[in-house]
Amino acid sequence: MRKAFILLLFISLSLHVQKVMAQTNSLNKVLLEKQDFAEKRYDRRKPEFLFKSSKNVLVKYNPVTLTFGSLLFMYQKGISPQLSANCPYVINCSNFSKQCIQHYGMVKGIALTADRLTRCTQFTLIDLRPSQFTKERRIIDPVEQYTFKHAH
């Protein structure tokens, strides 16, 4: 009777240890995934000035360009890392804004940025097709899709 009790105690103790180890392993896995996501997220954040590589002096040293470029750079460098918001898009909104302004100019770039910021909510997921998502369930919205198509 005593041997059976010790055997049952040993079995229940080993099952409990296995359960605790499984919970610990799953918790460690979740923590590692979050850490990997955080490292990937902050590796992407390498802000540069808006028209850093422009050779046109009027574009590079225009007071409006300098103002918008400085504000965007300060946001990307100081404010954006502090906000731990999870952007649903592949290209986050501030990088999208910078690319639009560089590609299309100040007026159309700001208009596209305003449009993107109004769509940067969870409600946009309702109207999208499955082909517009990556495997990580992020929305694909490239800057190049906003060019006008010329019919020949």
Image (spheres, grey):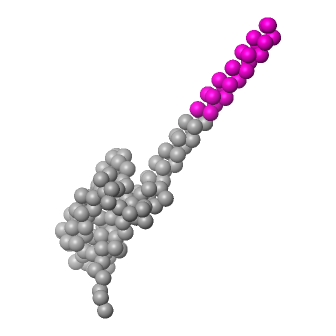
Horizontally, residue 5 falls left or right of residue 93, namely right
User: Who's the residue at 36% across and 66% down the image?
Assistant: 141
Is residue 15 part of the magenta span, yes or no? yes
- Quarter containing the C terminus: bottom left
Horizontally, residue 23 falls left or right of residue 37, namely right
Residue 89: percent from left, percent from top: 37, 59
Residue 112: percent from left, percent from top: 25, 67
Can residue 75 be seen from the camera position used here? Answer: yes
User: Who's the residue at 30% across and 53% down the image?
Assistant: 123
Is residue 145 part of the magenta span, yes or no? no
User: Who's the residue at 38% across and 63% down the image?
Assistant: 129
Residue 1: percent from left, percent from top: 79, 7
Q: Looking at the picture, tell me which residue is in the foreground, 18 or 87.
A: 18
Q: Looking at the picture, tell me which residue is in the foreground, 57 or 104.
A: 104
Question: As displayed, is residue 26 above or below residue 83?
Answer: above
Question: As displayed, is residue 145 above or below residue 80?
Answer: below
Q: Quadrant of residue 46?
A: bottom left
Q: Looking at the picture, tell me which residue is in the foreground, 63 or 79.
A: 79
Horizontally, residue 30 falls left or right of residue 117, namely right
User: Who's the residue at 29% across and 88% down the image?
Assistant: 151
